[in-house]
Amino acid sequence: MTKEDSKHILAQVQNLMHQAGNLLIVVSDPIDPDCVGTALALTWLLEQQYKHVEVISFFRIPPGMKNFPNIHNVSIGTADSFDFGRYDIIVLVDGCDWTQFLGKDWKEISARIDLNKVINLDHHFPGDIQTTIPERCFNIKTSSTAQLLYDYFIKPSGVQTPPDVADCLYRALLYDSRNFKNEMHPGEYNFAADLIAAGAHHEKAVDTNFEMQEFTFLVWAIDHTEFIPELRLSLLVLDVGAQNELQKIISADWKDFDRLYKELVERQIKGYNYGIILIDNLDGSIRLSWRTRSYGDHLSIGDIAREVGFHAGGHRNAGGGRFSGTLDEAKARLLNAMQQASAAGEARLKD
Ligand SMILES: [Mn+2]
């Protein structure tokens, strides 16, 4: 997208929101501090303009989000029975694919929605929403959707950000930047400084208490990770047996507790640039997630996954995807493609 295009889209999106009286904001799966923080801050901004705003999630709120400030303002709905027709404008925040907002039946559900009313605010690599409604997707490659909202909507409005809104945005920034460990985007520290000045509570936001289950997952997962030095890859494959074990030692919600493993193991160990998790969804499809070091010249796991038949998106260094087929096939395809890509461009795998 050129600068001119994005200016035009921003004007279009601002105009649509300006004209609307009744707005729906939809948060994206995974439900995380960025989508929720952005949605709540946008709600405040629009309510300043005397609009009626509702925030909805068509996915459950994970345990780690239960203490997020003002999370009770996000209602939980069922996408296939939801009445989208009641709203003038529907804003999708912090996601690029329809499945992230509407779930796996998005095709039938989106057919019932007037897409001329849909706006997308996002900072990910553009996905299938961009393909459908390019003229209403405001997408900027920045630290977080929270920063996009602040830089292009809140700050230009000239309205003073209240402390609880600053707090939501600050948590979104900390989460998406991994406390400033990810690649640095223009204005990122200015954004943080403005939020602190507006009353964001830094000590409270960083006063993180891990859930014990995250340690249980970490210890189990380290033990079950394949370290493949020639590919610089740490690989965790969760077949049905592994999932049963995790269910026993953690709970049925074991998938909610992988954050510490991803933070400490994936891309954090010298010599291992790539961390991949493959999970059998037990419905004929496989879920992929990856992490890649931010520094240095490395292969793009997203590109590789797409080349071998995955539907994959997110960011270059952190993303996810889906593959139709078996776990063995998904693994073989990825490892083969990584092997070939690394043989073709050995230099790209160097530190
Ligand atoms: Mn985000």
Image: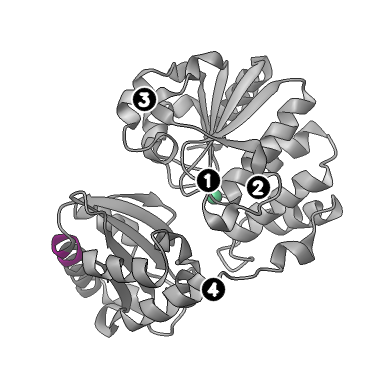
Q: Circle 2 sits on which residue?
A: 147
**Disc 3 vs disc 2: which is toward the camera?**
3
The amino acid marked with disc number 4 is: Met
- Give me the C-alpha separation between circle 1 and circle 3: 24 Å
Q: What's the distance in space between the residues labelled 1 and 4, CA to CA?
A: 32 Å
Is residue 209 in the magenta section?
no
Q: Which residue is mark 1?
A: 123
Question: In front here: 121 or 45?
Answer: 45
How far apart are the two marked residues, 2 and 4, measured between alpha carbons? 31 Å
Quadrant in which the C terminus appears: bottom left
Instruction: Kindly identify the amino acid type of the residue bearing the numbered disc 2.
Output: Gln
Ligand 1 within 8 Å, label 1 CB: yes
Q: Is residue 310 visible?
A: no
Q: Is residue 346 shown above or below 177? A: below
Front of the two marks 2 and 4: 4
Q: Residues at badges 1 and 2 in contact (C-beta under 8 Å)?
A: yes
Q: How far is the residue under mark 1 from the one under mark 2?
A: 9 Å
Alpha carbon separation for disc pair 3 and 4? 38 Å
Residue at figure coordinates x 57%, y 58% from the top left? 64
Looking at the rendering, which quadrant does residue 110 occupy?
A: top left
Residue 339, position as x, y percentages in the image: 20, 72
* Residue type at tag 3: Ile
| SS type, badge 4 | helix
- Chain part drawn in magenta: 328-332
Chain-order first, disc 1 or disc 3: 3
Whole-number angstrom distance, CA of label 3 to CA of label 2 = 30 Å
Mark 3 sits on what residue? 109
Identified at 66% across, 37% down, the residue is 73
